[in-house]
């Protein structure tokens, strides 16, 4: 049986085919490339029951991933991340408890492990020896870990306010890491500028074709966890939007395979008020998003002033009947504290943003009382600054 049913890559704008057996970045049109699969052949060879019977983790979906051989699939013990109901946290009367998909349980403590596991696996298989990435922290940590596993050199460029724990994690895993006096788009320019001189492969969001394939396993996994149907709404913290685009791609593939039943979820992109280019573009009815000036938010993972896949994000939101919402840093901070104290779940700021957006969507009627709702917590809350403890007790008194 074939390990992968991937056949080629296509430009996400023009549909122009590209060779999946060669190292690729953006398409000739400067747009992201998407992996295409022989779903007709796959439908004849594999059943949902076969997937269910396998060991948990992203590689159980190997037929729908681009890696060609089992020996090329890098792993650090990925798991299926749990769905945790917020039974004690605030919600409108009569509403079902929202379910948090806690991606902090993955290697390196974030959902970036999914995308980078596949992207680094493919890079190594195609002969890359040196990789570089602009990162707000978690993507760099994941790339460093999987690059170490593959024996590759790794280089990471981070905004200078990246949490210290992320920087230390990247460095400890053997990568070269630098602080940059700018935002992630400034870091991306440095990666692009050094590509020819240093010979590294650019692993930036959607500038190579395979991070999206790893991230789409979130959507595949949700289908499995919901017994081959899907929830009514999914709230996703959106910066570069790879996971949101990937999940929508995954559900189209599952629908074509005949593996899922019922309607697809409404996708709700969640951004911070201090950096909300997708929200502004969605509300304006635009097909692309203008760069956001003076981007700032405590949720660094969604502080992306301009996303190269903006048109794909906006298309997925509209095709799914979803929307885009922005929440304030004050609401993000309050949401994080509330869920931790009420339900014992320590969210990342980006994950807390989805809970704050959920409350707003419930108030405004964008979701209903009977809706099954999934909120994505993209990373362990342990990776972010927490309030200091100042109370003392004198044991001698």
Image (cartoon, rainbow, N blue to C red):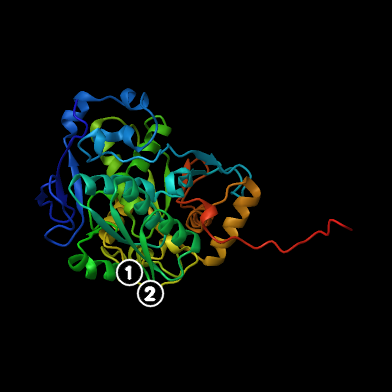
Q: Horizontally, is 22 left or right of 64 in the view?
A: left
Q: Position of residue 250 (x, y in %)?
A: 29, 41
Q: Position of residue 281 (x, y in %)?
A: 33, 66
Q: Which residue is mark 2?
A: 182
Front one among 336 and 290: 336
Front one among 124 and 336: 124
Which quarter of the figure is the C terminus placed in?
Answer: bottom right
Is residue 65 depicted above or below 347 in this figure?
Answer: above
Indicate the secondary structure of the residue bearing disc 2.
Answer: loop
Q: Position of residue 244 (x, y in %)?
A: 34, 51
Residue at 22% of width from left, 41% of height from top? 66
Residue at 53% of width from left, 40% of height from top? 84
Whichever of labels 2 and 1 marks the residue nearer the N terminus, that label is: 2
Which quarter of the figure is the N terminus placed in?
Answer: top left
Question: Crowding at label 1, few (<14), some or many (≥20) Cα neighbours within 10 Å?
Answer: many
Is residue 229 depicted above or below 381 in this figure?
Answer: above
Front one among 219 and 364: 219
Residue at 16% of width from left, 31% of height from top? 40
The part of the image, by quadrant, that contains residue 154 is bottom left
Question: Crowding at label 2, few (<14), some or many (≥20) Cα neighbours within 10 Å?
Answer: few
The answer to whether one can see residue 165 in this image is: yes
Q: Position of residue 325 (x, y in %)?
A: 43, 60
Find out whether the residues at labels 2 and 1 contact each other: C-beta distance under 8 Å: yes
Q: Which residue is mark 1?
A: 187
Q: CA distance from mark 2 to mark 1?
A: 7 Å
Indicate the secondary structure of the residue bearing disc 1.
Answer: helix
Q: Horizontally, is 211 left or right of 197 in the view?
A: right
């Amino acid at each position: 049986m074939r390990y992968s049913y991937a056949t080629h890559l296509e430009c996400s704008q023009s549909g122009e085919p590209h060779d999946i057996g060669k190292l690729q970045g953006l398409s000739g049109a400067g747009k992201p490339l998407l992996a295409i699969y022989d779903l007709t052949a796959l439908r004849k060879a594999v059943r949902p029951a076969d997937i269910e019977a396998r060991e948990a983790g992203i590689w159980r979906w190997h037929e729908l991933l681009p890696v060609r051989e089992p020996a090329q699939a890098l792993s650090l013990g990925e798991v299926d991340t749990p769905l945790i109901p917020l039974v004690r946290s605030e919600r409108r009367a009569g509403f079902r408890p929202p379910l948090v998909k806690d991606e902090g349980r993955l290697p390196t403590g974030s959902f970036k492990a999914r995308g980078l596991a596949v992207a680094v696996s493919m890079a190594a298989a195609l002969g890359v020896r040196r990789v570089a990435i602009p990162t707000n922290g978690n993507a760099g940590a994941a790339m460093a870990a999987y690059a170490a596993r593959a024996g590759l050199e790794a280089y990471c460029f981070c905004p200078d306010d990246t949490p210290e724990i992320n920087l230390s994690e990247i460095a400890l895993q053997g990568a070269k890491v630098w602080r940059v006096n700018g935002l992630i788009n400034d870091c991306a320019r440095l990666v692009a500028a050094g590509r020819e001189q240093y010979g590294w492969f650019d692993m930036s969001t959607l500038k190579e074709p395979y991070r999206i394939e790893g991230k789409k396993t979130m959507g595949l996994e949700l289908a499995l966890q919901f017994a081959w149907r899907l929830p009514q709404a999914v709230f996703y913290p959106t910066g570069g939007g790879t996971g949101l685009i990937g999940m929508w791609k995954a559900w189209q593939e599952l629908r074509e395979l005949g593996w899922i039943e019922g309607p697809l979820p409404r996708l709700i992109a969640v951004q911070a008020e201090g950096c909300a280019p997708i929200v502004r573009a969605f509300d304006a009815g635009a097909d692309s998003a203008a760069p956001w000036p003076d981007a700032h938010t405590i949720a660094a993972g969604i502080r992306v002033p301009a996303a190269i896949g903006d048109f794909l994000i906006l298309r997925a939101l509209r095709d799914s009947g979803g929307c885009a919402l922005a929440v304030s840093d004050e609401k993000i901070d309050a949401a994080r504290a509330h869920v931790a104290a009420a339900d014992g779940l320590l969210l990342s700021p980006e994950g807390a943003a989805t809970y704050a957006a959920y409350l707003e969507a419930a108030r405004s009627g964008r979701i209903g009382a009977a809706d099954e709702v999934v909120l994505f917590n993209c990373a362990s809350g342990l990776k972010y600054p927490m309030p200091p403890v100042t109370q003392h007790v004198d044991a001698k008194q």
